Structures are given as C-alpha cells and as structure tokens.
Amino acid sequence: MPKLKPDNLLYRCYQLGGAVLLTSLLAGCNSADPAGPAGSRVPLYFDVKGLLDQQVKQLSANSPAVEKHAALRDGAAETVRVPKVKWADELQIFYQADINKAALRGVYKVDSTALPGGLMRRRYTRQGTPPNAPVKELVVVSAGTETRLLEADIEQHNTLFDTHKHVQLVLQQGHLRSYEVRGRQKLIFFDDLPYAVSGQVE
C-alpha cells in the first residue's frame, strides 16, 4: 500500500481508489441544499449539518491531534498521528448523511427507542429507493439534547459504479471522540474496492 500523507490521510485513502472513487464520495457534499441556507432551514429530521458545523467550529478552535488509521482492499492498515487537522475538510464527507432537504420531506420513517442509561435511539429509515435520497438509514443516539452517536448507511448508484459506505461519529459530552468511514465501491469492469478510514481524537 502506498504511503499516506499524514496531513490529509482521509482524502488520500479515497484517492488511492482512483478519481471515480473520490468523485463519488464527494458528490453528495457538493450538491446544493434545496432547503435553502442553514439559517433559514427548519429541520424536519435530525440536524446533521448543525451538529457537524458545531463540531468543525469547536475542533478548529481547540485544534486537537488525531491518530488515524487507513486501509484499502486487504492491505494492512497504516497508522499515523496528525498534530494539526483541517477539520472542515476532514469531516466533509459526513455531510452526506444530512437528510434535511426539501425534496426528502416525508421520505424517511422515524422510529424512537428508549435505551438503558437514559439514552434514546432515533432511526430514520428511507422508504423505497428514491434517486435523490442516498442515505439508506440514519441512526442517532442521544442523552437528552446531547448527541452520543451518529451513524449512517449511504449508497450511490449509476451506470459506471456502485458505492456503499457506513459513516460513524462518536461523541462524549459534546466533543467528538472518534469517527470512521468504511465501505466499498464497484467500478464497471473492475474488482470491488473495500476501504476503511478512522480517526481517534486526542
């Protein structure tokens, strides 16, 4: 496995899979939000964008180091400690889990389950397979107003490739503790490309 640049491990791992992998992963991040600017949005579902914006601001101010791990295919994972991270770039892919778009209103079924320890799990499940709803399922675990866990299954399909990825954020007392992106992509005429990237915030 090629050596990864420690200052941008997350995106470098994607690039190792080729330009199409990078394009497909970032496609959802660059799409316009038909619900309008963040200040005018009234979230129908969990406010993923609001949580991420808050974390990016907080992490950029505190500037914690991160221990990162990345692996492609069946190769051994590489680990590197990064003392300074560009958090707006590092967490960009997680914005793909945002389902608060005008076109997605009514697309997701919401189920709530009480968990031990005063926790609440809310599961947002896509109904059917509308083409403008790449998030198959979003799960949020919270304690009151404090988010503890966010994870989502995201899939994208077209005539050239199929991608499936699972993203996860783990928070403690309002601070991001760890994050992970793992999945696979199947390009036409090529083998599956599984990948996994994670970070532990120090």
Image (cartoon, rainbow, N blue to C red):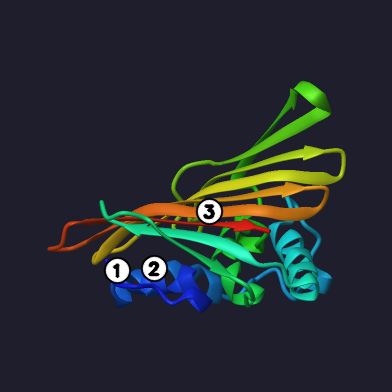
Q: Is residue 117 left or right of residue 121?
A: right
- Pair 1/2: label in front: 2
Which corner quadrant of the image does residue 188 belong to?
A: bottom left
Which corner quadrant of the image does residue 94 belong to?
A: bottom right
Q: Secondary structure at mark 3?
A: strand
Image quadrant for the C terminus? bottom right
Q: Confirm or deny contact between disc 2 and disc 3 (CB under 8 A).
A: no
Residue identified by numbered label 3: 180
Determine if residue 183 is in view: yes
Q: Is residue 131 left or right of residue 125?
A: left
Q: Which mark is residue 17?
A: 1
Q: Which mark is residue 72?
A: none
- Measuring from the top left, give residue 57's x and y in whole percent: 78, 72
Sort mark 2 into few (<14), some (14-19) or many (20+) by Cα contacts within 10 Å.
many
Q: Secondary structure at mark 2?
A: helix
Q: Is residue 39 left or right of residue 136?
A: right
Q: Secondary structure at mark 1?
A: loop
Q: Residue lying furthest left in this view?
A: 189
**Spatial CA span between label 1 and label 2:** 7 Å
Residue identified by numbered label 2: 13
Type of the residue with mark 3: Glu
Q: Confirm or deny contact between disc 1 and disc 2 (CB under 8 A).
A: yes
The one nearer the camera, 72 or 182, is 72
Type of the residue with mark 2: Cys
Type of the residue with mark 1: Gly
